[in-house]
């Protein structure tokens, strides 16, 4: 669920707080130096309340990789109540709201493929999670990423609009219209596809098509179509927050003025 600082697993409450905060600082620019984790009640390794606050943290460039343990794991810590929040967390300049709560949260220590220690959620009860972003914020995030990708091909994006239509509780139809310019030629391209969120909070893209307006648009679409074919069928993480061994259920994606992903987890 979280990377830990240092190379060893913590053995005290103070070490746990410092290790989680240092691990978060590897992935984000934290807004406060006071620590990302707070603990109330109990004594190591069993606590009444564990709070992890990422409000104001920034992943300036892109989402960091999801922490994945390769085992073998060993007993970690337990919290009667777990609360994780970010109001908001920034991906580039886009503000993302995150809320996660659970009861009887049991963690294990593990290591990723490089040997870095992680704290992984092994079990929980009555877990609920919400990730939300205002539609204009999402538009700006998509535009920022598109401009970066286009510039590598010598293309300038002048305007862009993003349309989202609900297909089913987990899937959206996506339409992106972009006015682009390369050298002295300006045209409009339309990208269409589907986006579906899985139980691991990965967004899978499929059925990608690209078309252009007029002869020049058709030529531009033909030139970039192989790039889109490379990502058709791929999945991309929606969040750096991993739920470890716990799997989501009743996951829903909602498109509107606010784009929201909600889910439950645990027994």
Image (cartoon, rainbow, N blue to C red):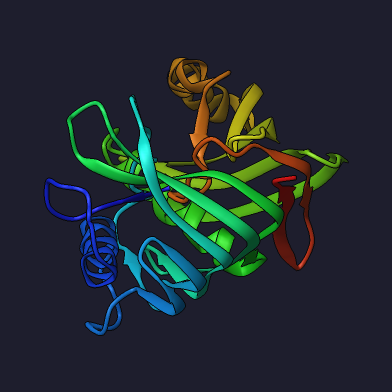
Q: Is residue 262 above or below residue 180?
A: below
Can residue 160 be spotted in the picture?
Answer: yes
Q: Is residue 142 above or below residue 190?
A: below
Q: Quadrant of residue 204?
A: top right
Image coords of residue 140 (percent x, y): 50, 63
Task: Identify the residue at image location x=74%, y=50%.
Answer: 264
Q: In which quadrant is the C terminus drawn?
A: top right
Can residue 67 be spotted in the picture?
Answer: no
Image coords of residue 221 (percent x, y): 53, 24
Front position in the image: 254 or 189: 254
Front position in the image: 108 or 90: 108
Seen as rendered, the residue at the extreme left is 7
Image coords of residue 118 (percent x, y): 31, 44
Front position in the image: 43 or 139: 43
As drawn, is 112 to the left or to the right of 157? left
Q: Is residue 140 above or below residue 242?
A: below
As drawn, is 45 to the left or to the right of 13? right
Task: Identify the residue at image location x=64%, y=64%.
Answer: 132
Image coords of residue 216 (percent x, y): 52, 28
Q: Quadrant of residue 183?
A: top left
């Amino acid at each position: 669920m979280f990377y830990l600082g240092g190379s060893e697993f913590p053995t005290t409450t103070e070490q746990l707080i410092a290790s989680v905060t240092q691990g978060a600082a590897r992935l984000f620019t934290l807004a406060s130096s006071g620590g990302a984790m707070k603990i109330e009640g109990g004594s190591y390794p069993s606590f009444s309340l564990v709070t992890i606050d990422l409000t104001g943290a920034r992943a300036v460039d892109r989402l960091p990789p999801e922490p994945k343990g390769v085992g073998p794991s060993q007993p970690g810590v337990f919290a009667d109540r777990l609360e994780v929040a970010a109001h908001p967390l920034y991906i580039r300049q886009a503000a993302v709201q995150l809320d996660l709560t659970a009861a009887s949260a049991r963690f294990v220590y593990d290591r990723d493929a490089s040997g870095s220690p992680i704290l992984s959620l092994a079990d929980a009860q009555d877990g609920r999670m919400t990730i939300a972003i205002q539609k204009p914020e999402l538009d700006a995030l998509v535009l920022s990423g598109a401009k970066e990708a286009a510039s590598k091909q010598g293309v300038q994006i002048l305007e862009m609009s993003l349309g989202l239509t609900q297909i089913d509780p987990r899937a959206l139809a996506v339409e992106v219209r972009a006015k682009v310019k390369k050298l002295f030629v300006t045209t409009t391209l339309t990208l269409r596809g589907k986006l579906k969120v899985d139980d691991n909070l990965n967004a899978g893209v499929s059925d990608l098509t690209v078309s252009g307006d007029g002869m020049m648009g058709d030529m531009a679409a033909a030139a970039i179509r192989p790039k889109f074919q490379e990502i058709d069928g791929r999945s991309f993480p929606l969040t750096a927050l991993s739920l470890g061994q716990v799997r989501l259920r009743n996951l829903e994606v909602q498109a509107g003025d606010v784009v929201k992903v909600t889910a439950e987890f645990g027994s």
